[in-house]
Amino acid sequence: MPIHYQQILQGLIYRKLLSKELSEFLHNQGFFYHKRSFKLFTFSRLFGTHIFDHRTKRMIFTDDIYWQVSSVNPEFIQELGQRLLLSDQL
């Protein structure tokens, strides 16, 4: 993984949602409060044993990877969880 991989993970979340409408709503609009837009989800960095390749500026994970996604929106968590559990690969 490149060292600046957060945008990749965010894109993965949007692509894995079952509902195209929910994905587009969160990506393009979100929930507004006082002229600010909120997506109402967050995610952690990747956790796991890795080696940093200075030549390519990439992290090479050598074992299992752990990642946490959180949201107050139950529809979002249910859809993302179902899709990730049913996927053969990411």
Image: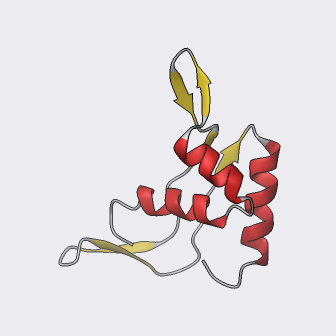
Residue 56: image location, x then y, percent: 22, 77
Q: Which of the pair 35/67 is nearer the observer? A: 35
Inspect this view and state whether residue 46 appears: no
Q: Which of the pair 40/32 is nearer the observer? A: 32
Residue at the top extreme, as displayed: 34
**Residue 64: quarter of image:** bottom right
Residue 25: image location, x then y, percent: 63, 45
The colour scheme is secondary structure
Residue at the bottom extreme, as displayed: 88
Using the image, determine if residue 35 lies above or below residue 24. above
Using the image, determine if residue 72 lies above or below residue 17. above
Residue at the left extreme, as displayed: 55
**Residue at figure coordinates x 60%, y 51% from the top left:** 24
**Residue at figure coordinates x 76%, y 40% from the top left:** 73
Using the image, determine if residue 41 lies above or below residue 36. below
Inspect this view and state whether residue 21 appears: yes
Residue 13: image location, x then y, percent: 60, 59
**Residue at figure coordinates x 60%, y 65% from the top left:** 15
**Residue at figure coordinates x 82%, y 44% from the top left:** 74
Total numbered badges shown on the rendered structure: 0
Q: Which quadrant is home to the C terminus?
A: bottom right
Q: Judge from the rendering whether residue 65 lies leftward or rightward of residue 51; answer left or right.
A: right
Q: Judge from the rendering whether residue 36 lies leftward or rightward of residue 68; answer left or right.
A: left
Using the image, determine if residue 34 lies above or below residue 64. above
Residue 84: image location, x then y, percent: 72, 70
**Residue 42: quarter of image:** top right
